[in-house]
Amino acid sequence: MPYAADISRNNPGCFLFLIDQSGSMIGALGGQPGLRKDQGAADAVNRILDAVSQRCSQGMDVRDYFDIGVITYTTDDLGGAELGSAFPGTSAEQPFLSISEVAEIAAVEDRTVKESDGAGGIVEVSRKFPVWLEPVAAYGTPMCAALEAANLSVENWIADHSNSYPPMVINITDGAASDGDPEPIAEQIKGLGTTDGNVLLYNAHLSGIAATPVQFPSDESELPPDEYAKSMFRMSSVFPQPVWQLAANMGMSAQEGSRGYVFNADMVSLVQFLDIGTRAASDLQ
Amino acid sequence: MAVLQPPRKFWLPKAGNRSDEYEDACRVVYPDRIGASGEQMAWAVVADGASESAFAREWAKILTDGFVSRHLDLASLDKDALVEWLKLAEDQWHECVPWDRIPWHGETKARAGAFAALLGLSIGAALDDCERLKWQAIAVGDCCLFVIHEDRLQQSFPLESADEFDNYPSLVSSNRSASKGLWDAVRSTSGECVSGDVFILASDAMACWFLARLEDGDEPVEMLMELNEANWADWVDEQRESGMMRNDDTTLLIIEIG
């Protein structure tokens, strides 16, 4: 059965995040005036990297069950693609670090948060918040260039991990590509695969308006009449059975045929989306 | 008086993990002979620490050490007795965690506590019959006991088919607040055994393999009885590579009544 490979040090999983850092990401996320889209995307990715680090944490160590990359994309002031990597010492061409290295390089902030004291009261406690990705918003949206880089780096990763759970590429963006039609490159990425199945490409479309997100649609008719949304829908992989079943079990509207796409994502649906994408592979034994 | 053959214990960490990352635990303690008095009993236990939780290896070891040294009366076990028994284990776990040195990624998990599946077995004399022994077993989660009589599976406990295994078994927690519903998850059973019977205790990957093979018409008892220290690791590797056995910490304990 595909999408069932065990995750282990010998056969690690792979997550690659593509983060749109174009100028329009400065806008408010999900109609929340206090939260910019670039901040929301950075917070969501930091939370997911934190969650995956914690899942792989055992006692004092982090076990290398995953390789992770974060490619950022924007342009220079002349419109040329500017691709980067959130992890020091890596690049858009070679973006991956093992999860123990990812955990090691986190900038850890102490924040005071309010928590339940377990007896009906609230107490203030100090908690550690790891940060890898800072918010940035400037210039254009070279999504095609970012997908090309993803295609190359994932292809290289698969060459070394041909029996692993297939890599997941998760693109977080708020706008149309400024460098062409991304659909053909998306098809190339989805055509890559390991012995356990094809690469999964998911897309989160951030919204600037307060509207109900369309989560994991299975048909274009569920989308608003927006060519860009339809294109992103077609670019997105159909959830494998274990993934849509997990999403459904967690109370989300997912079914057979649902795609890894969320339109009009607000902060809640963005975090849920990343959680589903990464959790299906990382529920460890 | 019944004689127990020396127990045969086998274990192997998940492929890719080191021996010191093995998070199952297994203990067996018994006298050479059972039946001279009711106090001479055998105790055997397998625990499977959940990798999703912190310091699970330590928790599995504390539970199994406790099971063979602080004996529970399995025949009349109630919620209060179990809670009382667990208190010392919880304290031991808290003492072994280096709270002041835990890195940021381990903090939340450590606060949530460790979790483990547990299967415990006691074998003692039947008061009215020197030919038969009585046994009791308790389980929380998916470690399994298989009772073999005349080379056939007589009882499978607590799970009975391979499709009952999933990623979300009931577990014993080192965190008392997470153990509130524990009693509802406790399963117990009992029976009698005679000379020639075999008890097989297994953590989930091995137990699931056993039931799947049985359902496919194979002879898993025969296959397990042929295992020895020399062929065990290669045999598990073969099962894993062929997709017959999940790549997970693997533990097997075989006890034969002589």
Image (spheres, rainbow, N blue to C red):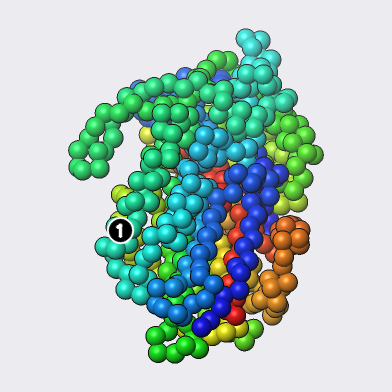
On the image, the x and y values in percent for residue B44 come to: 50, 66
* Camera sees residue B143: no
Q: Residue, x 42% and y 84% (percent of image)?
A: B126
Q: Name the quadrant containing residue B186.
A: bottom left
The residue that mark 1 highlights is B83
Q: Name the residue furthest right.
A: A159
Count of marks overlaid on the render:
1
On the image, the x and y values in percent for residue B152 come to: 62, 84
Query: Label 1: chain?
Result: B
Q: Residues within 10 Å of mark 1 (few under 14, many from 20)?
A: some
**Residue B9 higher or lower than B216, as above or below:** above
Q: Name the quadrant containing residue A186.
A: top right
**Residue B219 higher or lower than A213, as above or below:** below
**Residue A183 higher or lower than B71, as above or below:** above
Q: Secondary structure at mark 1?
A: helix
On the image, the x and y values in percent for residue A218 come to: 55, 52
Q: Name the residue furthest top.
A: A77
Q: Quadrant of the N terminus of chain A?
A: bottom right
On the image, the x and y values in percent for residue B228 come to: 72, 65
Q: Residue, x 40% and y 73% (percent of image)?
A: B39
Q: Name the quadrant containing residue B68.
A: bottom left
Q: Would residue A211 appear left or right of B13 to someone viewing this image? A: left
**Residue A196 higher or lower than A77, as above or below:** below
Amino acid type at image mark 1 = Val
* Camera sees residue A121: yes
Q: Residue, x 38% and y 34% (percent of image)?
A: A210
Front residue (pair B113, A148): B113
